[in-house]
Image: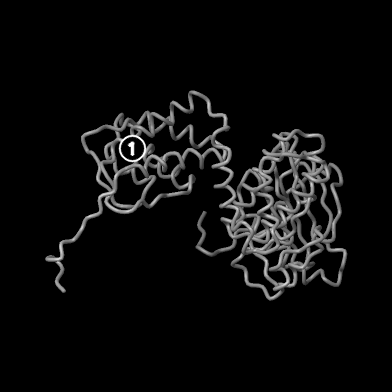
Amino acid sequence: MNKNPGEIIKFIRNKEYTFQRNVGKGGTGITILVKDEITDMNFVCKKYSPSDITKKTEYFSRFIDEIKIMYLLSHKNIVRIYNYFLYPENSSGYILMENIEGATIDNYLIFQTNDVYEKIFIQLVEGFEYLEKNNVLHRDIRNENILVTNDGIVKIIDFGFGKKVEFKSNNEASIFLNWPVSELPEEIYNRQYNHQTEIYFVGKLFNKILEEYNIEDFRYQHLLDSMVLTNPKKRIKSFSSMIEALSNDIFDELDFTESEKSIYSTFADELICHISFMKDELILKTEPSEVISLIENIIKDSLLEDILQDNRRLITCFISNSYSYFTTKDIHIKTIREFYRFLKNLTEIKKKIVINNIFTRLRMIMIKIDVIDDGDIPF
């Protein structure tokens, strides 16, 4: 194919889907279930067609923003977008999304036990933490927009009012929606809406479900109480802070198998015993995804090796500060591989717990900060 960069490539064959059933209807259009006969997969198709035709052109840009936002996201607790079709000449379009077989969060939790409430709450926080890290605001947090699959997986849907924080907009009044709460957070009255505001509405939503179903002794009620404070200065600061609090809170009761504990201990022992001392204050790499990616690169570069050729590569997967290490001790590639597979397959909460435990060990290593003799200072 002889094409020049920037040249338009057109696929002129139309993609066909088989109608299955109607799914729903909202203020911005309708959704139906369709089937791709080639892949034998069902998709939810959302059509942009607002009921208020006077706003059709105005809201079309918001529909395009929804597509842009959804294409940025890839997380098990966020609905996935597969394709889209735009018809700007008619101010219309379609989004093909993941089909979710399940129920709204409030309907799913009817008659469930406390441990199910805990699992759903953790997933809810993990999903919104992912949005927070990607600078995406949902801005329409209600039961209808949080589904739970039949397998118990939370799915955050409908980013029609969503916003990428970097997007410039002069229409900030759009944050004043018909929120399903009787009391609004204080920052709303100052025309502010941020991730801490999302925390408030997520907390309010979950708290209301607990109250309606008379759930007592909810394990994370102390976190919920901090989420629903109207004063943002007193409210918990971020979803990341909540994940850290959840990690610390459930550490002792998480069910790690004896095999998993053995893999962790073997790896942590080999890692720590190869560091002699820290040369300055500890600087940790706190994102499990970053740690996993760095370890993966080590494994790819050591496919024909039994022993790691440069111990520094593994140590710098976890810390960024200066340190002294032993060059005469071996780190086995098999140990690294087993730890990598173990860590990669854990839930986000468990990943953070494993990483935090390694950090606890690293903090126990002696720090030797070089002191400069005054006689060496020129002035």
Please say if 173 is above or below 306.
Answer: below
The colour scheme of the drawn protein is one colour
Res 40 → quadrant? top right
Residue 208 in picture, x, y percent from top left:
79, 49
Q: Position of residue 128 (x, y in %)?
A: 64, 52
Callout 1: helix, strand or loop? Answer: helix
Image point 43% across, 30% down: which residue? 338
Q: Is residue 347 left or right of residue 310?
A: right
**Residue 137 in which image quadrant:** bottom right
The answer to which of 11 and 173 lies nearer the viewer is: 173
Image coordinates for residue 239, horizontal then vertical, percent: 60, 53
Which residue is found at the position 86% from the left and 72% from the top?
54
Q: Residue at x 15, y 68 (%)?
A: 377
Residue 89 as seen in the image, left or right of residue 7: right
Considering depth in this image, is 271 or 36 the residue closer to the camera? 271
Q: In the image, is residue 253 above or below residue 87? A: above
Residue wearing tag 1: 272
Tell me the kind of residue under disc 1.
Ile
Instruction: Report the residue at 81% width, 69% height from top.
Output: 56
